[in-house]
């Protein structure tokens, strides 16, 4: 089993702990980051939409597979380097309204895992749901890197088990669990989302590799192009 930190990029400054692992320091400074939920992102909770940075352990969060789930831990990071020092490969991605279910324009970190519902994924993987690193979306429907702001903050929401949460209306974001049974890839290298079993066992979310995710998105781009060419 591999934890989420083994699947996505975690970038840190000199001497600073990484963001995103449930057993590192809760508050982290002197760094930049490429995973987590950016401050300002709205997350669906029991009492409505709330900014990610205002959430606390014990809050009830609406999840994709398990309904309302109690938030176990919340980790924060504040980037203290200047935006000009932030490597462009780790810039947040600007996502135009409506592209991945977001009601308005939003930003997402490139290492954040996103769950997509796609007929192309169904054709390629035998499952319409694909969990992919956001960086693979670069270039699709106007999604592009955008320079970071002067005081960026990121939040990692942790549950007892891996969960997918709703953000910015219908965007589906992966949040890791504390169970030690997070991201995994089987011996054959299969990378597909495993749905929860009917007997109540926890879902096991397995992301596509960045290469496979980019292949999927390339096919989605081709589908869009084909539809545009076929339009009267």
Image: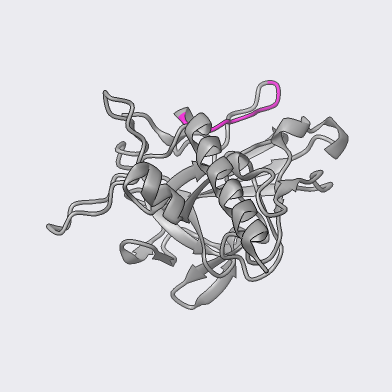
Quadrant assignment, res 27: top right
Q: Position of residue 42 (x, y in %)?
A: 60, 66
Quadrant, the N terminus: top left
- Please tell me which residue lies in front, 217 or 96: 217
Q: Does 11 lie within the magenta span?
A: yes
Residue at left offset 46%, top offset 28%: 6
Q: Is residue 75 left or right of residue 93?
A: left
Q: Position of residue 93 (x, y in %)?
A: 70, 47
Residue at left offset 35%, top offset 39%: 182
Q: Position of residue 51 (x, y in %)?
A: 61, 65
Q: Is residue 183 left or right of residue 99?
A: left
Q: Is residue 4 left or right of residue 133?
A: left
Question: In this view of the protein, can residue 3 be seen by the observer?
Answer: yes
Residue stretch rendered in magenta on the structure: 7-14
105 vs 8: above or below: below
Quadrant assignment, res 3: top left
Q: Is residue 37 left or right of residue 144?
A: left
Q: Main secondary structure of the magenta part?
A: loop
Quadrant, the C terminus: bottom right
Q: Point out the residue furthest to the left here.
A: 199
Q: Position of residue 210 (x, y in %)?
A: 52, 32
- Please tell me which residue lies in front, 18 or 86: 86
Q: Does 137 lie within the magenta span?
A: no
Question: In this view of the protein, can residue 155 be seen by the observer?
Answer: no
Quadrant assignment, res 25: top right
């Amino acid at each position: 089993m591999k934890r989420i930190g083994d699947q996505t990029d975690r970038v840190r400054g000199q001497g600073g702990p990484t963001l995103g692992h449930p057993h590192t320091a809760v508050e982290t400074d002197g760094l930049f980051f490429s995973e987590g939920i950016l401050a300002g992102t709205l997350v669906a909770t029991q009492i409505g939409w709330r900014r990610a940075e205002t959430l606390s352990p014990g809050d009830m969060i609406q999840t994709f597979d398990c309904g309302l789930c109690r938030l176990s831990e919340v980790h924060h990071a504040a980037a203290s380097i200047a935006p000009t020092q932030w490597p462009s490969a780790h810039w947040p991605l600007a996502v135009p309204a409506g592209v991945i279910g977001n009601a308005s324009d939003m930003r997402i970190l490139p290492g954040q895992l996103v769950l997509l519902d796609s007929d192309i994924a169904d054709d390629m993987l035998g499952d319409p749901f694909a969990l992919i690193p956001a960086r693979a979306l670069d270039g699709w429907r106007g999604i592009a890197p955008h320079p970071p702001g002067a005081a960026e903050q990121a939040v990692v929401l942790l549950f007892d088990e891996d969960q997918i949460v709703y953000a910015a209306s219908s965007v589906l974001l992966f949040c890791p669990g504390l169970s030690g049974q997070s991201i995994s890839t089987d011996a054959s290298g299969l990378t597909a989302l495993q749905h929860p079993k009917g007997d109540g066992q926890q879902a096991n979310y397995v992301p596509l590799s960045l290469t496979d995710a980019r292949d999927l998105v390339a096919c989605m781009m081709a589908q869009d192009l084909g539809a545009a060419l076929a339009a009267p």
